[in-house]
Image (spheres, helix red, strand yellow):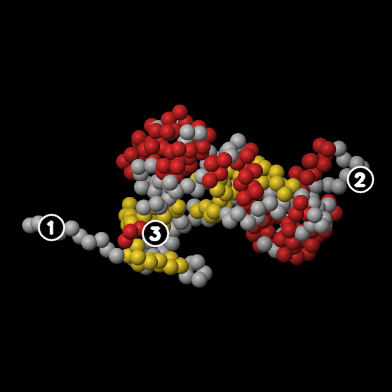
Amino acid sequence: MAGRHLCSHRYNEFVELHNNLKREFIGFNFPKLPGKWPFALSEQQIDSRRRGLEQYLEKVCAIRVIAESDLIQEFLTESNEENCGLLNVEIKVLLPSREVVTVGVSRNATADIVFEAVMRKVGLGGKAWQAFSLFEIMEYNFERKLQPGEIPHSIYIQNYTTAAATCLIIKRWLFSISEEIALCHNDQIATLFFHQAIDDVNRGFIYAGERLYQLKVLQDPGRKHDYLALARELPGYGEIIFPHCGCDSRKDGHVIPSIGLQQFRLRACSEDGTPESQIIEFPWDIVTSWEIDEEGMAFCLQYKKPEKKSQMD
């Protein structure tokens, strides 16, 4: 379960939810609630029952129509205490190394507070905060950067049925190679850059091509600086990759858009997002204008074709 402490609920409120769900979803075989003991419970028994109630919610919310019902949504968001927003919750966040870091914050903690809590827990501060940010893991192999005022715990509730350990991840958010190289004097920061570069190569975001074997040879933490030096030379390094989509310049298949320091790039892919070899690049100095529609669903750009050099016969 993504958020362990969604809010404070008594056992009898779970019983009421259970009965209401059975009335609304007739015919569904709901799991049983953990039994209620008439006497005082030990700490171990309380923890066991809590885990049983969490497992009950996980099984129920595995059915999408039930998870999205008003009964479940109200149960996950309402509180029988006025200060629910001050209750501590545990939030799990992935690092680029795929290590999971758990931090305790208030239920209404904003993204910048959660980010700072994670960075402090892993022992990073100062300039390192400017090189990373907190992202939401979304569909289509895409991570969305959270705005500082967003509430990560609310995102947990929206992604309550996810099978992954968490829907939040710390990722590189830096657009200067020189600044990155300077930060790599800190071994811990260099390790995070190293693991993200490996992940980007494995996902096809960095186009290794014939140099993939060289990267594999360097894929050891002890050679992370050599790995990063080579990765920085490859197309796609440090770029923001967007989900694949249709494009009016391509009749068959989709494209994977990406934005980097030097250019806007379109990489051909199949309709299911499998990358293909064809790549078109638009250096920023030839892009004359661009716009996004009101709903943010379409992106258009105008560019001037570079003048061809004269050829001598």
Q: Nearer the viewer, mark 2 or mark 3?
A: 3
Q: Mark 3: which secondary structure? A: strand
Instruction: Provide residue 254's location: percent of width, then percent of height.
Output: 39, 61
Q: Are marks 3 and 1 in contact (CB under 8 Å)?
A: no
Please tell me which residue is depicted at 38% across the width and 42% down the height of the picture. Answer: 232
Looking at the rendered structure, the kind of residue marked 2 is Pro
**Quarter of the image where one finds residue 120:** top right
Among the two numbered marks 2 and 3 on one chain, the one whose residue lies closer to the N terminus: 2
Please tell me which residue is depicted at 50% across the width and 71% down the height of the picture. Answer: 294
Q: Mark 3 packing: few (<14 Cα in 10 Å), some, or many (20+)?
A: many
- State the residue position of label 3: 255
Among the two numbered marks 1 and 2 on one chain, the one whose residue lies closer to the N terminus: 2
Q: Mark 2 packing: few (<14 Cα in 10 Å), some, or many (20+)?
A: few
Q: Are marks 1 and 2 in contact (CB under 8 Å)?
A: no
Q: Is residue 312 left or right of residue 112?
A: left
Please tell me which residue is depicted at 31% across the width and 41% down the height of the picture. Answer: 210
Q: Visible in this render: residue 163?
A: no
- State the residue position of label 1: 311
Instruction: Provide residue 257's location: percent of width, then percent of height.
Output: 41, 57
In space, the residues marked 3 and 1 are separated at their CA atoms by 33 Å
- State the residue position of label 2: 38
Q: Is residue 77 left or right of residue 129?
A: right
Looking at the rendered structure, the kind of residue marked 3 is Val
Q: Is residue 250 above or below residue 14?
A: below
Q: Residue furthest left?
A: 313
